[in-house]
Image: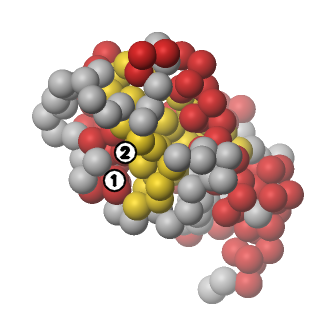
Amino acid sequence: MDTVCGIDEVGRGPLAGPVVAAAVVLTPGTSLPGLKDSKKLSPEERERLFPLIQEAAAAVGVGWAWPHEVDRLNIHNATLKAMERAYEMLIQKLSPSLVPTEVVIDGRHAPPSITHARAVVKADTFVPEVMAASIVAKVFRDEWMKIYHRFLPEYTFSQHKGYPTRLHRERILTIGSCPIHRRTFLVRAARSP
């Protein structure tokens, strides 16, 4: 029986915060009603599914690429780095009998270090492990942005999670950037209307 690992990421577009990737192997025979791509779920639905995914998973790995890495590597390579880290964490937690025979990554590119991975566009719409990974990554990133909000409430990160909303751009114009802003993204955002 094939063991499938699904990998997905969130946080490519924000002006602040990390890119987060998750890797998930579901226990064989698992069924999770309501499982979908995280973008198609409300925050409440994601929060409801998150513990169910953790219970149903043989293992979950989460990887991060921090804002300074996004600036140094570029968003594409930082995303691949977060995916590598998520997969490495997953492998450390996984029983040797469940090492993935197939790794499916949502998108067009797979990290070269995961040699047996294949990138599949829109995999988060039909591969349950990728759907689960998208939810795990989104919940982890949103929670991290809420933590940032506690330390930097003036940026209202709990509302926009670092994405380039009007409110977020206004806060940056009014008080400047902070250490979790992606410098390379701020330059681009300043040129945008």
In this rendering, does residue 126 appear at all? yes
Q: Which residue lies under the disc numbered 2?
A: 130
**In front here: 97 or 121?**
97
Rendered view: 42 above or below 173: above
Marks 1 and 2, how far apart at CA: 5 Å
- Where does residue 150 sit, x and y in percent of width and height? 64, 31
- Mark 2 crowdedness (10 Å alpha carbons): few <14, some 14-19, many ≥20: many
Mark 1 lies on residue: 124
Question: Callout 1: helix, strand or loop?
Answer: helix
Kind of residue at badge 2: Val
Please rate how many residues cluster around mark 1, counting C-alpha atoms within 10 Å: few if below 14, some from 14 to 19, many from 20. Answer: many
- Looking at the image, the residue that sits furthest to the front is 1
Task: Pinpoint residue 168: horizontal percent, then vertical percent.
Answer: 62, 60
Work out whether residue 13 or residue 131 is closer to the camera in this orientation and state it.
131
Quadrant of residue 123 within the rendered picture: bottom left
Instruction: Of the two numbered discs 1 and 2 on the same chain, state the one appearing first in sequence.
Output: 1
Query: In the rendering, at what x and y percent does residue 69 appear?
Result: 80, 50
Most foreground residue, 162 or 154: 162
What amino acid type is highlighted by mark number 1?
Asp
Label 1 with label 2: CB-CB less than 8 Å: yes
Residue under the image location 57 percent in, 56 percent down: 110
Picture quadrant where residue 89 is located: top right
> Residue drawn at (64%, 41%), measured in percent from left and top?
84
- Residue at disc 2, secondary structure: helix
Q: Give the residue displayed 36% in from the left and 37% down from the top.
A: 4
Colouring mode (rainbow / by chain / secondary structure / one colour): secondary structure
